[in-house]
Image (tube, rainbow, N blue to C red):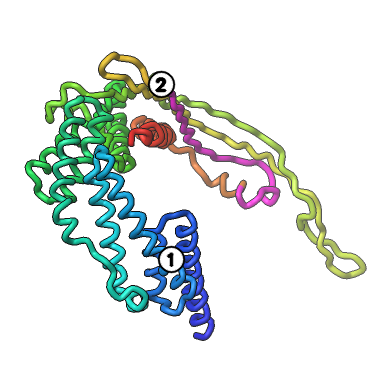
Amino acid sequence: MKKLSYLLLVIVATFLCVNCSSSKRALQHGDYYNASMSAIKTLRSNPKSKKSIEVLQQAYPLAKENSLRKIQNALDANVSGKYSIVAEEYLALNAIADAIYTCPKAMELFPQPEQFSKELREILPLAAEESYNLGERLLQLNTIKDAREAYYHFVKAENYMPNYKDVKEKIQDALFAATLKVVVQKPITPKRYQLSADFFYDNLMAQIFKITANQFVRFYTYEEARKEGLNNPDQYLVLNFEDFTVGNLRETKNTSEITRDSVLVGTTTVNGEKQNVYGTVKAKLTVNRREVISEGILSARIINAFNNRVEENRNFPGKFVWVNEWASYKGDERALSKAQLKMTDTEPIMPPPEQDLFVEFTKPIFDQVVSFTRNYYSRYK
């Protein structure tokens, strides 16, 4: 119990030390907002932290001074997005004030932290209108890049003034226009393998949906694209089994002589006493090995739907070898190891169906395609 209490004490002390260091580091880098918030967080659990008290005493006044300077500069310079700048700074100052009110030690240092609720009530409608208008102008440029910027502006407008005009619809419009829409082509194989190829494709689509947390990339099957009326996708991801063989049989037989020394082979009598006799025993072991080899290559081409240019072309190999071994011997079984003896009790068996072999050799291909897709589309942020 004492050890547990000591461990907890060490963990808490380490946590507080990290918080103190982070707040001090933020202060030194001029990040007065995070320095203030980090110091307040530490003071809630450790009101006697001298470092955090010192950081907050310095950082909070500087945070106010810095934010008010940015606000005035934005208004004086009449810069694009000025109301958003003003709103964000007032929101940051109010967040620090709210944090102080929930920390007794911070309240001792700053009994009446200044809040800017009146200023926010005046500026938020202007910031919402400004962000909404910027979003509309960008959306009209009809490019994916501009649509993404428009999306963020519409989201800001919604955050400033919930339900502002038709901003919810605009957010969805901008998101759709900002999204790279990729139609994934199902690989076509001979009919007897198509069921397994479909299984591969369905699993791949399910995995792709999981790995693409990026909201600006969406993958469609041909059926989904047709159902949703997607006539102009941005890209095609074309999958095709360029070359594959299933069920190539290879059988080998290997006979070897196995010997083992110091094996009890009998007894003898020496001077009227029985003694064990040790010698070498031999056996001929024949090992039969049946291999069924299935392998192939899947190509993945990313094609620009507007000009049919191949943006990326990769080949992914896969191989699966099904193995069955059995053995027979002639001679003294004591020459054999336990594993060899066990193999002599094994009978030859039939290989799995071709559909199963197809699935097996595509497993390493599956992992490669998932990794390729994740890496390639991670750039679209």
Query: 300 above or below 179?
Result: above
Give the residue pinned by disc 1.
58
Label 1 sits on a secondary structure element that is helix
Name the spot of residue 270 as percent of width and height, x first: 90, 65
**Is residue 337 left or right of 251 when viewed as pictured?**
right
Q: Report, in whole angstroms, how far the alpha carbon at label 1 lies from the one at label 2.
A: 57 Å
Give the residue pinned by disc 2.
313
Q: Which residues are magenta?
A: 312-339
Label 2 sits on a secondary structure element that is strand
Mark before the other along the chain sequence, 1 or 2 = 1
On whether residue 34 falls in the magenta region, the answer is no
Query: Within 10 angstroms of label 2, few (less than 14), some, or many (20 or more) residues?
Result: few
Q: Nearer the viewer, residue 260 or 13?
A: 13
In the figure, residue 152 lies in which quadrant? top left
- Say whether residue 351 is visible: no
Q: Residue furthest bottom?
A: 2
Specify the amino acid type for callout 1. Answer: Gln
Query: 142 above or below 84?
Result: above
